[in-house]
Image: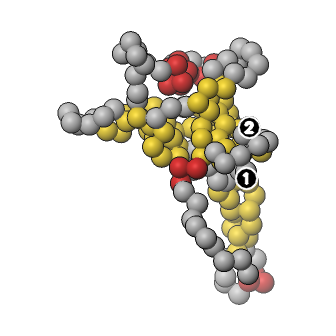
Amino acid sequence: MTTPVSTALARRFRVDIDTAWPAGPATWTQFLGVTDLKGIDPKPVNKARVTYDTDGWQGSQKTMQEISPEITFQRDLDATGGPLTCHEVVRAALDAFGEDGTVHIRWYDRSGLGEAYEFYGIPAWERSATGVEDLEMIKLSLTDIGRGRIPITNPLA
């Protein structure tokens, strides 16, 4: 048995957004201001599997899986007071349809080891901190377009 010497930090993931999607080859830009990243692991979709043979016990069988990443970020501004490109790519997709209404992201371990995935999703943008004393925070929820998370080589490897 290996003895643990430390615990992984939640902030070990970096998120990038493809600013050229869907028009051209991927151009990755760091998605700045991330304060929370969740929903990046698939969840099973189970269906009941019941027969007379189970003596009244319901069983389940995994038939599909789903994933719904959620990124909470601080809406930072550039030196001129304007919005950051990485955030504006998402805002542009909000009112569009088809591929233009989707975003292409990737997330990976900052250490260069371990997990690395890319994902295509339909964005939903919700202001999550709206009080007068708050910094503007956005909860970005992404709905899978049916590709799931796609394993990639960690770009920092």
Residue 47, position as x, y percentages in the image: 69, 63
Residue located farthest toward the left when viewing the structure as drawn: 132
Kindly identify the residue that appears in the image at 76 percent across and 77 percent down. Answer: 51
Q: Is residue 21 above or below residue 142?
A: above
As drawn, 122 above or below 101: below
- Quick one: quadrant of the C terminus? top right
How far from the left and from the top, in percent, is residue 53? 78, 84
Up the image or down, 99 lies above or below 117; here it is above
Residue holding disc 2:
155
Position of the N terminus, as image quadrant, is bottom right
Q: Residue 77 at x, y = what percent?
A: 40, 22
128 lies left or right of 155: left
Residue at screen point 58% across, 30% down: 30
Q: Amino acid at mark 1?
A: Gly
Q: Is residue 96 left or right of residue 106?
A: left
Q: Examine the image and state in which quarter residue 49 appears.
A: bottom right
The secondary element bearing badge 1 is classed as: loop
- On the image, which quarter does residue 123 sit in? top right
Q: Is residue 27 above or below residue 107?
A: above
Three-letter amino acid code at the position of disc 2 = Pro
- Residue at coordinates 71% horizontally, 77% vertically from top-left? 2
Disc number at residue 114? 1
Earlier in the chain: of badge 1 and badge 2, it is 1
